[in-house]
Image (cartoon, grey):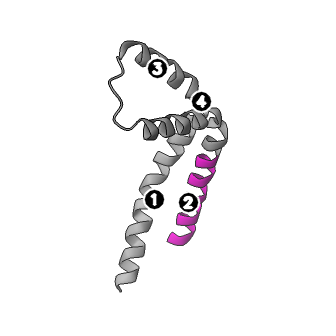
Amino acid sequence: MEEGFIFEAVSKIVFWSVPLIFLVGLLLMFGSNRYKKLENELDKEVVKPDRLFPRLERNIYKFREWLLQKHVLVGLFFIVSALYFFISLKVYAR
């Protein structure tokens, strides 16, 4: 009985997060140029304070740069996974 409740709760969470995953995929595919422009504008206006964790911050920026370089591939992955989750949840609901 308890396992069915847990599975039902997880399926509800996944079902409601599918539109968010789909939108993130669309934004990654079509909105990366706008993000780059916004990042450049914010970088000009904000003075960078002393770094607390410079190594961690470099890793975060490396990941962000990789994500922006591969934005089409990652966006397609998000869209395909959102469609897969949606279809699998609809099949399960029958």
- Residue assigned mark 1: 15
Image coordinates of residue 59 in percent, x first then y, are 50, 40
**Dot 3 alpha-carbon crowd within 10 angstroms: few under 14, some 14 to 19, many 20 or more:** few
Mark 4 or mark 1, whichever is nearer to me: 4
- Check disc 4 and report its element: helix, strand or loop: helix
**Dot 4 alpha-carbon crowd within 10 angstroms: few under 14, some 14 to 19, many 20 or more:** few
Which sits in the foreground, 6 or 86? 6
Mark sitting earlier along the chain (2/3): 3
Say which mark, if any, is on residue 85: 2
Q: Which amino acid does label 2 sit on?
A: Phe
Which sits in the foreground, 36 or 15? 36
Q: Estimate the spatial distance between the alpha carbons at disc 3 and disc 4, rounded to whole Å.
A: 14 Å
Q: Estimate the spatial distance between the alpha carbons at disc 2 and disc 1, rounded to whole Å.
A: 7 Å
Quadrant (top left/top right/bottom left/bottom right) for the N terminus: bottom left
Horizontal arrangement in the rendering, residue 16 relative to residue 78 (left or right) = left
Mark sitting earlier along the chain (2/4): 4
- Check disc 1 and report its element: helix, strand or loop: helix
- Residue assigned mark 4: 30
Mark sitting earlier along the chain (4/1): 1
Say which mark, if any, is on residue 38: 3
Q: Estimate the spatial distance between the alpha carbons at disc 2 and disc 4, rounded to whole Å.
A: 22 Å
Residue stretch rendered in magenta on the structure: 77-93
Q: What residue type is labelled 4?
A: Phe
**Who's the residue at 61% across and 58% down the image?**
84
Q: Can residue 79 be seen in this view?
A: yes
- Check disc 2 and report its element: helix, strand or loop: helix
Mark sitting earlier along the chain (3/4): 4
Q: What residue type is labelled 1?
A: Phe
**Contact check, label 2 and label 1, Cβ < 8 Å:** yes
Which sits in the foreground, 25 or 1? 25
**Dot 2 alpha-carbon crowd within 10 angstroms: few under 14, some 14 to 19, many 20 or more:** some
Q: Is the magenta stretch mostly helix, strand or loop?
A: helix
